[in-house]
Image (spheres, grey):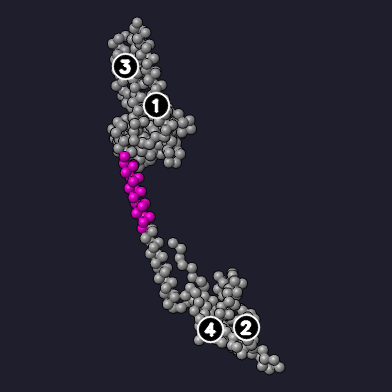
Amino acid sequence: MAKPIRPPEFKFRALIDTREKEERSIICVSLIDPIEEIRKDRKRFEELAKTLVLRFFKVGKEGGIILPSGSKRLDKGLILEMESFEDLTDVSGPVRKPGYSLVLKVSYESGSALKTLELANKALEEENEALKQEVRELLDLAAGLEAAKESLRVSFDAIKDLMISFDCEGNILIVNEACTEWFGQSPEDIITRKKYKVILNQDVLSIIRKVCESKETLRFEEHIGEKTVQITYIPMTNKKNGETEVVMMAQDITGQKNGDIIENRRNGSGLIMGMAARNVLNSSLTAILGFSQLALSSYDWPKATRARYLKLIERTALRMKNEINKVVEKKA
């Protein structure tokens, strides 16, 4: 709220001339020790001074000057006071030339100053109350954001595969609880460090930047100890700021690989086509499951991203169908 405008106080000298039959004129007006604010607008204040002088005195019917008791109240709590008066009438010549010098001061009445302070204090109180309301609204907004963040975390943690969200600079934004089983560290421990160059034997920084530039999904397999891990990098667009983020999903596919090897040894070379088909089916099902989990999560995916997931699921399903047909034809 704007503070009340307080006009400046000032002092001036006025030379006036009176004539008979209530005639009067201002010879000149000069400001006395004006402050910087008044000096910048001297002409306007001189015109104001002339107006105030004419309101301050009157001329008698027989000539001469009529003055009030010594002060006159103005608008906005101001008062016009006379500090000195001098009769400059020239009576030495054949014609009497009346003239007077007045020194007047425009200032605030003591009661008015108190009123101004009260108004200013009231304005400050209203501004303070408005600020308190803004603080309450901000606290409510922060609580809402925390609730939304917690909802996202719960959805993220429901996925058992390792999932980490990065910005394009490789900074970790979110990591789910699966990291405890994969790394023996809590999500808080991982996010505290914020940035990693290598995760699961992968140069994640280089891969993330490549995905951000191409806006295409990349998939890799890594052998970590006795595990075979499939790692998928999926580009996403943050609807709030328009920035690209990358979701990394790591899946342990060791069981699938070992099962394929055992089946291959058991059935011999005659079942190579079946094994290949099974591998395709397993990887296809894994892809469908992964993209379905992403699409069904509570995260507000952009419409284009959801459409891309559905197309990928459709394409993978068609691939599965073709592989099944090949196996059936082979057996026939």
Task: Quickly name the residue at label 4.
Answer: 82
Observer-nearest of 288 and 113: 113
N-terminal of the pair, mark 1 or mark 4, is 4
Residue 106 drawn at (x, y percent) = 52, 78
Query: Residue drawn 34% across and 33% down?
Result: 297
For marks 2 and 1 on the same chain, the one whose residue lies earlier in the sequence:
2
Amino acid carrying label 1: it is Leu
Whether residue 88 can be seen here: no
Label 4 is placed on what type of residue?
A: Met
Q: Which residue is mark 1?
A: 310
Magenta region, residue range: 132-151
x and y percentages locating residue 115 in the rendered image: 42, 73
Give the label, 1 or 4, closer to the camera.
Answer: 4
Residue found at x 56% / y 78%: 52
Single out the mark in the foreground, 4 or 3: 4
Q: CA distance from mark 2 to mark 3?
A: 117 Å
What's the amino acid at mark 3?
Asp
Residue 71 drawn in magenta: no
Q: Give whichever of 114, 164 is nearer the camera.
A: 114
Query: Gap between marks 1 and 4, in whole Å?
Result: 89 Å
Between the residue at mark 2 and the residue at mark 1, the CA separation in whole angstroms equals 94 Å
63 relative to 183 in the view: left or right: right
Q: Which residue is mark 3?
A: 260
Looking at the image, tell me whether mark 2 or mark 3 is earlier in sequence order.
2
Mark 1 lies on a secondary structure that is: helix
Q: Residue shown at 63%/86% (left/top)?
A: 21
